[in-house]
């Protein structure tokens, strides 16, 4: 079977789910191609998978205008690329949202191929978490409905996302859970060290966005250090909140206690993360967070790193048992 996987991210890079899908398909003997945005990586092959790149460069730190440009132009690039792949000929084109309407580009680019929409984030709930207008939320709901009805198959990452899609559009989505790439994140037994009098090393990795509660984490760190606990925080990742978080770090007097490492390839994280005492997941409750499982929680657990997390239903759900 010939499969095209499409993602508006650098590849290989931070998108672990698409990497695992590509590797599994390739190892099962399928012919796989990736179409991705431009980024740090310049590889043309990865684990037997051929990679082609859009002229559009994915910017993790971007304004609303830049994000709209990405969401508008990348689907046009996908439409043209899928159309050019007709000579291949493709059996399945699977697109990863956001944006949802990549499913339309896949469908109309080659109607002979089956189209799969892999919903990583439910965009209307994401817009609510970002304080977008009601008009924007309704427009995203309309485009989401059009996209899920166009795709031959919809898959998503949690039962909560599945239920949101079903209640809005009457569409059934199959659940394919996120998980760690065990060829990269080798499982380790947890090591619990005495922290009462030692320097405590905290870590967060992932997207830097207000909805993930990093401002709360910085204020908590300042409180800890102000009450005699010696603690530091390393942050791996990038996003639209990085500048404001760096400013908050300075205003709280934490410049010596907080280190921003920027975006790090996922395959390097298992080397870096085990040095830390606690992995922190400081998510803030919102309609979006209530639908999503935390990839960080899976990765910390796999590496045996103790986790301090917000008391949310989704995190309790994924880590129980």
Image: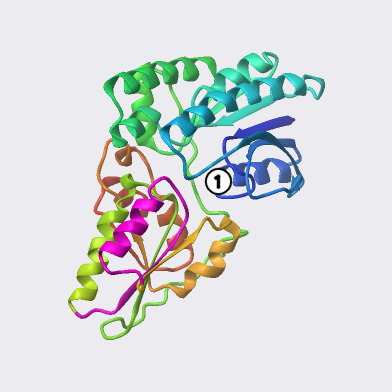
Tell me where residue 281 sits by quadrant: bottom left
Q: Residue at x 24, y 68 (%)?
A: 222
Q: Residue at x 37, y 36 (%)?
A: 159
Q: Is residue 180 above or below residue 257?
A: above
Magenta stretch containing residue 252, yes or no? yes
Which residue occupies the foreground of this view, 283 or 227? 227
Quadrant of the rendering where the N terminus is positioned: top right
Tell me where residue 17 sits by quadrant: top right
Residue extending furthest right?
87
SS of the residue at dot 1?
A: loop
Give the left or right position of residue 279, taking residue 82 as reference: left
Q: Residue at x 45, y 53 (%)?
A: 206
Which residue occupies the foreground of this view, 257 or 115? 257
Badge 1: how crowded within 10 Å, few (<14), some, or many (20+)? some
Residue extending furthest left?
227
Give the left or right position of residue 119, taking residue 311 as reference: right
* Residue located beneath label 1 in the image: 15
Q: How many marks?
A: 1
| Residue 71 image position (x, y, % from top left) | 51, 28
| Residue 199 image position (x, y, % from top left) | 33, 81
Magenta stretch containing residue 207, yes or no? no
Q: Is residue 4 above or below residue 321?
A: above
Q: Is residue 283 visible?
A: yes
Q: Is residue 321 visible?
A: no
Q: Residue at x 35, y 72 (%)?
A: 257
| Residue 208 image position (x, y, % from top left) | 40, 50
Q: Is residue 198 above or below residue 259?
A: below
Which residue occupies the foreground of this view, 112 or 289? 289
Specify start and end residues of the magenta stretch as a single range.
228-255
Give the left or right position of residue 198, taking residue 173 as reference: left
Quadrant of the rendering where the C terminus is positioned: bottom left
| Residue 102 image position (x, y, % from top left) | 56, 24
């Amino acid at each position: 079977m010939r499969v095209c996987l499409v993602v508006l991210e650098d590849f290989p890079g931070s998108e672990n789910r698409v990497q695992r899908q590509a590797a599994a398909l390739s190892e099962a003997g399928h012919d796989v191609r990736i179409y991705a945005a431009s980024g740090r990586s310049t590889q043309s092959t990865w684990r037997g998978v051929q990679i082609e790149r859009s002229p559009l460069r994915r910017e993790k730190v971007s304004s609303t205008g830049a994000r709209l440009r990405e969401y508008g132009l990348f689907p046009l690039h996908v439409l043209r690329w899928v159309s050019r792949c007709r000579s291949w000929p493709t059996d399945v084109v699977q697109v990863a949202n956001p944006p949802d309407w990549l499913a339309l580009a896949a469908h109309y680019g080659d109607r002979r191929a089956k189209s799969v929409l892999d919903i990583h984030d439910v965009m209307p709930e994401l817009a609510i978490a970002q304080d977008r207008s009601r008009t924007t939320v309704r427009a995203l709901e309309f485009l989401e409905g059009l996209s899920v009805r166009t795709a031959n198959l919809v898959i998503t990452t949690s039962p909560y996302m599945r239920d949101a899609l079903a209640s809005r559009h009457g569409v059934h989505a199959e659940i394919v859970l996120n998980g760690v790439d065990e060829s990269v994140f080798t499982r380790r037994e947890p090591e619990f060290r005495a922290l009462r009098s030692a320097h405590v090393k905290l870590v967060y990795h992932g997207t830097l966005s207000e909805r993930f509660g990093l401002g709360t984490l910085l204020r908590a760190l300042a409180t800890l250090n102000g009450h005699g606990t010696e603690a530091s925080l390393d942050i791996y990742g990038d996003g639209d909140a990085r500048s404001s978080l760096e400013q908050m770090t300075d205003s709280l007097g934490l410049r010596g206690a907080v280190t921003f490492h920027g975006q790090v390839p996922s395959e390097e994280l298992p080397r870096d993360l085990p040095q830390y005492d606690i992995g922190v997941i400081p998510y803030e409750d919102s309609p979006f967070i209530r639908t999503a499982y935390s990839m960080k929680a899976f990765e910390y657990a796999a590496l045996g790193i103790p986790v301090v997390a917000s008391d949310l239903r989704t995190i309790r759900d994924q880590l129980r048992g």
